Image (cartoon, rainbow, N blue to C red):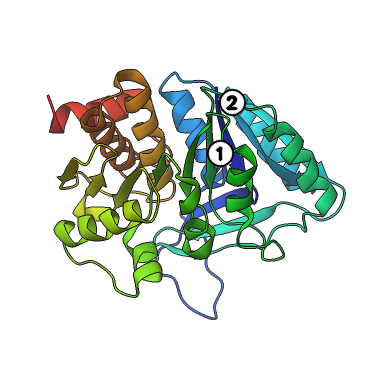
């Protein structure tokens, strides 16, 4: 079974505002209210591709109930821990203003609640996949993901990490199966942002040397690269299409890669499925459907 963990889920309020004017009242021309959070996005795209998963995480207040309810309506099994205080965050996405976002903080997660999550993770074993994705509340240590992988070490659990900075780097010594940094996150780690796919592969290789088995680098409109566990490398330009909404595109890439890998155990197939899924979500108002993903895949690799 695939398990995803989202420490800081959200209700994403995604709006278009025409002719935005600072300091004045503005009105939306379109709006969406959707469950969000990187782990949840991975679970939802996996579900669209016909692959079951269990979404783990924390929720609080009226927003937390709404997030879990909406996710379950989409057919994803949610096994969330509800916190007694606070409320799950609301993220405002101003889609028409160069992708501007205002993200909430989220509730405080205490030691007892973290302990409940660890008890759930202790049940994972050989053949299970664990996806650790997204940020954690600022009150939590930046070695949290690393601590989870250390706890699961030796059990045969396949780990996937999609995070930034120290939260990602501190997992590498536990040899995660897949990490998926983007260009900005590579810049945070190495102090320079690659400008070409070849340069991105170089830094992906360095992350493999630091412990990751596979490094998938998302590059937005420039496509993606993969430094694979068998030493092979793959790179491709982004499929052609009109970018509508980039929220969840990177998470869709993770889900597509996992779906392709589980179906074929072939790195090239997994890489292409990842790029197709990420691009299809970018071309859609929300997370891509199976039909949209396969259409993009067929366009690039008939």
Residue 232 placement, left or right of 186: left
From this view, report whether residue 220 is shown above or below residue 263: below
Residue, x 72% and y 36% (percent of image)?
80
Q: Which mark is residue 55?
A: none
**Location of mark 1 (residue):** 40
Q: Position of residue 49 (x, y in %)?
A: 40, 23
The one of 181 and 243 positioned closer to us in this rendering: 181
Task: Name which of mark 1 and mark 2 comes first in the sequence.
Answer: 1
Q: Is residue 268 above or below residue 279?
A: above
Residue under label 2:
76
Tell me, yes or no, whether the two marked residues, 1 and 2, touch with CB atoms within 8 Å.
yes
Residue 30 visible in image:
no
Q: In the image, is 95 to the left or to the right of 102?
A: left
Closer to the camera in the image, 149 or 1: 149
CA separation in Å, label 1 and label 2: 9 Å
Quarter holding the N terminus is top right
């Amino acid at each position: 079974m695939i398990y995803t963990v989202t420490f800081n889920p959200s209700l994403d309020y995604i709006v278009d505002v025409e002719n935005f004017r600072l300091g004045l009242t503005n009105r939306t021309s379109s709006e969406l209210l959707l469950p969000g959070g990187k782990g949840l996005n991975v679970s939802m795209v996996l579900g669209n591709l016909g692959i079951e998963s269990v979404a783990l995480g924390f929720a609080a207040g009226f927003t937390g109930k709404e997030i879990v309810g909406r996710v379950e309506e989409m057919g994803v099994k949610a096994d969330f821990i509800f916190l007694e205080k606070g409320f799950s965050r609301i993220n405002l996405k101003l889609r028409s203003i160069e992708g501007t976002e205002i993200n909430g903080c989220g509730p405080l997660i205490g030691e007892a609640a973290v302990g409940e999550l660890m008890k759930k993770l202790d049940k994972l074993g050989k053949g299970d996949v664990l996806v650790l994705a997204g940020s954690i509340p600022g009150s939590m240590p930046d070695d949290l993901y690393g601590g989870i992988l250390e706890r699961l070490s030796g059990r045969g659990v396949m780990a996937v990490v999609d995070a930034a900075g120290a939260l990602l780097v501190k997992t590498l010594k536990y040899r995660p199966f897949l990490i998926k940094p983007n260009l900005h996150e590579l810049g945070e780690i190495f102090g320079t942002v690659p400008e070409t796919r070849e340069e991105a592969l170089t830094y992906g290789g360095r992350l493999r040397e630091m412990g990751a088995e596979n490094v998938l680098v998302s590059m937005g409109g420039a496509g993606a690269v993969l430094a694979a566990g068998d030493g092979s490398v793959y790179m491709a330009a982004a499929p052609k299409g009109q970018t509508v909404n980039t929220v969840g595109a990177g998470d869709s890439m993770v889900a597509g890669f996992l779906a392709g890998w589980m179906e074929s155990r072939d790195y090239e197939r997994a890489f292409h499925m990842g790029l197709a899924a990420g691009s299809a979500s970018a071309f859609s108002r929300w997370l891509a459907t199976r039909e949209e993903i396969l259409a993009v895949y067929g366009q690039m690799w008939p």
